[in-house]
Image (spheres, helix red, strand yellow):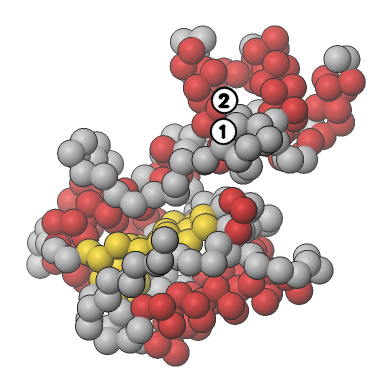
């Protein structure tokens, strides 16, 4: 099957989703996330595009970009090449970091623009990483809310906030209220594709910390307890540790982190009892 040409338009807005190659993590530390944000800032100065929203997850990135008359493929490719060079040099690796072809959808009206921005900002809560959007550092939500300063000059808030009010203080408050309301069920936004089982591979394989957190959240819901209470439910917690260790490539440190900050040595002792 031949590839379909990417839909482009002059002075258009795009929802961009870029995933790690083979669904691997793009960020292994906070320093990596800072570097990606700095890269966005440098490329924004170079290409003069508009960035309406962003969210960095473990193994994928959401960007809401206005091309400002530039080629969107060139913009995203430049961001990816610069960050991949840093990542490969830092971790002494080679090969592709990003999945070859980024996914994109054209945002052709202000209503959809607002909906996509809300969807992007809600990614960390939907993934079970945080329970409140303000607790997540790696999105543009706190720039809109005023909790953080936009030190890199990344976010162009005008078009989104003008949809609410000409008064910026009022508009920001109304936008934050909007983001914290439930998304319309009739709208499907572009997201990471569901994992497709590969013949001979474990269909339950957990490829990122996000997926592990989702598994923990599902277990909590099935047991009718809160996510945060898992750490106090020793048998449930230990069983999850074994399942995640068996069905993922996560390190002991990462497994301990998502289960309430348990030490690496403690995770090791739990697994050693099997």
Q: Tell me where residue 221 appears, x and y as whole percent.
A: 46, 16
Q: Quadrant of the C terminus?
A: top right
128 on left or right of 91: left
Across and down, in percent, residue 215 comes to 55, 27
Q: Quadrant of residue 109?
A: bottom left
Question: Is 133 positioned to the left or the right of 69 in the image?
Answer: right
Secondary structure found at label 1: helix
Q: Residues within 10 Å of mark 1 (few under 14, many from 20)?
A: many
Q: Count the marks: how many?
A: 2
- The quadrant in which residue 81 appears is bottom right
Name which residue lies at 27% across and 76% down.
8
Q: Secondary structure at mark 2?
A: helix
- Mark 1–mark 2 Cα distance, whole angstroms, equals 5 Å
Look at the picture and state if 17 lies above or below 10. above
Q: Residues within 10 Å of mark 2 (few under 14, many from 20)?
A: many
* Residue at (46, 41) in percent of width and height: 194
Q: Quadrant of the N terminus?
A: bottom left
Q: Name above or below for residue 240 compared with residue 7.
A: above
Foreground pick, 166 / 124 = 124
Is label 1 in contact with label 2 (beta carbons under 8 Å)? yes
Residue drawn at x 33%, y 71% is 6
Q: Is residue 159 left or right of residue 103?
A: left
Estimate the x, y position of residue 203 in percent, counting from the top left: 60, 32
Residue bearing the label numbered 2: 216
Specify whether 253 is left or right of 40: right
Residue that label 1 marks: 213
Q: Residue at x 68, y 74 (%)?
A: 86
Residue lying at the far front of the rendered structure: 1
Res 63 seen here: no
Q: Is residue 190 visible?
A: yes
């Amino acid at each position: 099957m031949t590839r379909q040409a990417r839909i482009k338009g002059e002075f258009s807005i795009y929802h961009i989703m870029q995933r790690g190659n083979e669904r691997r993590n793009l960020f292994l530390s906070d320093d990596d996330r800072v570097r990606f944000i700095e890269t966005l800032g440098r490329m924004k100065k170079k290409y003069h595009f508009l960035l309406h929203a962003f969210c960095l997850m473990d193994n994928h990135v959401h960007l809401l970009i206005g091309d400002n008359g530039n080629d969107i493929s060139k913009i995203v490719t430049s961001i990816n090449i610069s960050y991949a060079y840093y990542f490969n040099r830092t971790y002494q690796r080679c090969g592709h970091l990003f999945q070859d072809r980024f996914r994109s959808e054209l945002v052709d009206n202000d209503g959809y623009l607002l909906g996509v921005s809300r969807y992007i900002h809600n990614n960390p809560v939907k993934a079970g990483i945080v329970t409140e959007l303000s607790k997540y550092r790696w999105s543009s939500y706190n720039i809109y809310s005023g909790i953080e300063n936009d030190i890199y000059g990344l976010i162009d808030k005008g078009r989104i906030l003008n949809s609410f009010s000409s008064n910026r203080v009022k508009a920001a408050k109304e936008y934050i209220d909007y983001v914290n309301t439930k998304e319309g069920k009739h709208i499907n936004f572009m997201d990471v594709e569901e994992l497709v089982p590969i013949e001979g591979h474990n269909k339950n394989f957990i490829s990122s910390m996000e997926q592990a957190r989702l598994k923990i959240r599902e277990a909590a819901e099935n047991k009718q307890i809160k996510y945060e209470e898992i750490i106090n439910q020793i048998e449930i917690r230990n069983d999850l540790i074994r399942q995640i260790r068996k069905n993922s490539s996560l390190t002991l440190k990462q497994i301990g982190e998502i289960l309430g900050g348990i030490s690496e040595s403690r995770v090791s002792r739990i697994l050693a009892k099997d």
